[in-house]
Amino acid sequence: MGTVAGIESPPASAPLAVITYNLWQGRAQHELPSLVQAHDPDVLCVQEARASALPHRLGGMRLAVATSRNRLGVALYVRSDRLDIEESRTVQLTTSRHDRLVGGTDHRLAATRVRDSATGRGLVLGSFHATPFTDSNAARRRQVDDAHAALKQLGSGAPSIMAGDYNHPILLSMLRHHLGRQGFTMARTAGSTYRKEGNIMRGKFDVASVLGFEVTEAMTLPQGGSDHLPVLFRMRYAG
């Protein structure tokens, strides 16, 4: 660290590790403690969780926020010794056709604003689960737009990371260009993040959109009990 006029300045770069994992209707929920222990993330985003059974602690991580009105929850954990929680909320996004028919899926974003003690910076984090294939890609992009607007409202001007199941593996380039027009960068793996026995569908379902960060790595982790693979992103502050 350097100093300016006797004031200690934050480090120019302090890498962040973010994992996102769709738990496939809670089937892989028991894997979370070992996943955290093995990879030591700063942020963990989960989707399709049994929210009532989520632990408040996972090793050195704390549950920042989880949806409660969904049949399958969306939740976000942060590393306790680095990220101080300032405000958390769940957010209702544009209601899709699937949500109207099935019900109980009106909150698809769990978000929190934190203070990064490693840098002194504020940032906004989101765990996101878009509507499934019964809806159009346009409907999913509207939900992404809603989610980004909510993150900006939670932390105006702050760097942000939103990771999760975007359910947009087909024509993913359209989503990437859409994000780019809004100033966001897409973080995605080289290979598919979805593998289900007997299902030929492949694609990069699990991605992240970032603002104010440079992504240095995006990789799938070994498959467990879910039809999605856990995905690990490493990134650093831009500038």
Image (spheres, grey):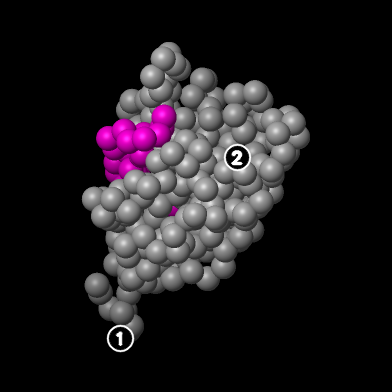
Which residue has dot 1 on it?
A: 6
Disc 2 versus disc 1: nearer the observer: 2
Point 54% across, 52% down: residue: 51
Pinpoint residue 188: horizontal percent, then vertical percent.
39, 34
Depicted 203 relative to depicted 150: above or below: above
Q: Is residue 121 magenta?
A: no
Point 36% across, 39% down: residue: 230
Point 31% across, 79% down: residue: 8
Count residues near mark 1 (Cα–Cα under 10 Å), then give few for <14, some for 14-19, many for 20+.
Answer: few
- The quarter of the picture where residue 81 lies is bottom left
Kind of residue at badge 2: Val
Q: Name the foreground residue: 114 vs 11.
A: 114
**Residue range of the region highlighted in magenta in the rendering:** 207-235
Pinpoint residue 125: horizontal percent, then vertical percent.
49, 55
Q: Name the foreground residue: 102 vs 174.
A: 102
Which residue has dot 2 on it?
A: 144
Pinpoint residue 118: horizontal percent, then vertical percent.
32, 69
Mark 2 vs mark 1, CA separation in Å: 43 Å
What secondary structure is found at the residue carrying circle 2?
Answer: helix
